[in-house]
Amino acid sequence: MINYFGHSMVSINDEIVIDPHDGGSIGLKRPEISSCNLILMTHNHYDHNAYELIEHKEAKLSFYGNFEYLGYKISGYKAYHDKVKGKRRGETAIYKVSWNNHVLVHLGDIGEFPKENIMKEISNPDILFLPIGGLITINSEEAISLAKDLEPKAIIPIHYWVKGSLLPLDPPDQFLSKIGQKIIEVKKSLDENNLEKAVYFITA
């Protein structure tokens, strides 16, 4: 089961959490999860690194490489948070998590298209967590183009403005209106065993 907690924070089967936030510092409610086994953080910015709020056994920040953990195969790839090789906002990891014939890719706070060799590694996932809010990541048009290149089965937009958010991001409207795919709205959770070729707009 995939759970979405707003912004860029997701969990996989309540065992792995990616990019935890604390809620209050970004204008959202505090995530309702108290523990997990592994926390993965794509980069060390306050809206992605609130690992101390969740009881956990292991945490990795900006991990690049491969490892296995409790039946999950995890790969981390280096990308940049801007279009100038990280000079403005630094690096961000891209995480690929594989388990039980499922593949999930979380693009972190990418500010540019990944390198060609990374694109090959992360293409055709079952689930793609895709930042769309622009300004400090790729914008909606860039996100649409990247999604077409990666050809995921399911797209889950992340890192965009919602009511109450304190972050200067674009709302999801433009992405949703131009992506040209079926939009399925769901509440918080998604069953990875029952996916359509669609954009899943998950409200936290």
Image: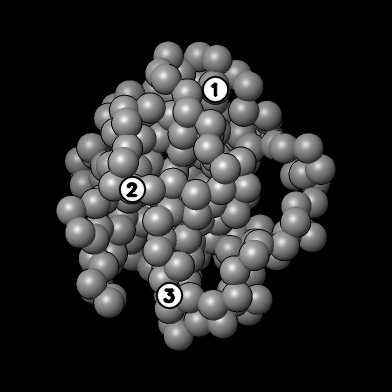
Rendering coords of residue 137 (x, y %) = 56, 39
* Residue at the disc numbered 2: 192
* Residue at the disc numbered 1: 175
Q: Which mark is residue 146?
A: none
Mark 1: amino acid: Phe
Secondary structure beneath label 3: strand
The 10 Å Cα crowd at callout 3, few under 14, some 14 to 19, many 20 or more, is many
Q: How many marks?
A: 3
Left or right: 180, with 82 as reference point: left
Note whether 164 is above or below 5 in the view shown. above
The 10 Å Cα crowd at callout 1, few under 14, some 14 to 19, many 20 or more, is some
Mark 2: amino acid: Glu
Which of label 3 and label 2 is nearer to you?
2
Rendering coords of residue 149 (x, y %) = 29, 27
Q: Nearer the viewer, residue 174 or 99?
A: 99
Q: How is the image coloured?
A: one colour
* Residue at the disc numbered 3: 38
**Alpha-carbon span between mark 3 and mark 2:** 19 Å
* Earlier-in-chain disc, 1 versus 3: 3
Q: Tell me the quarter of the picture where residue 48 sits.
A: bottom right
Q: Tell me the quarter of the picture where residue 169 sits.
A: top right
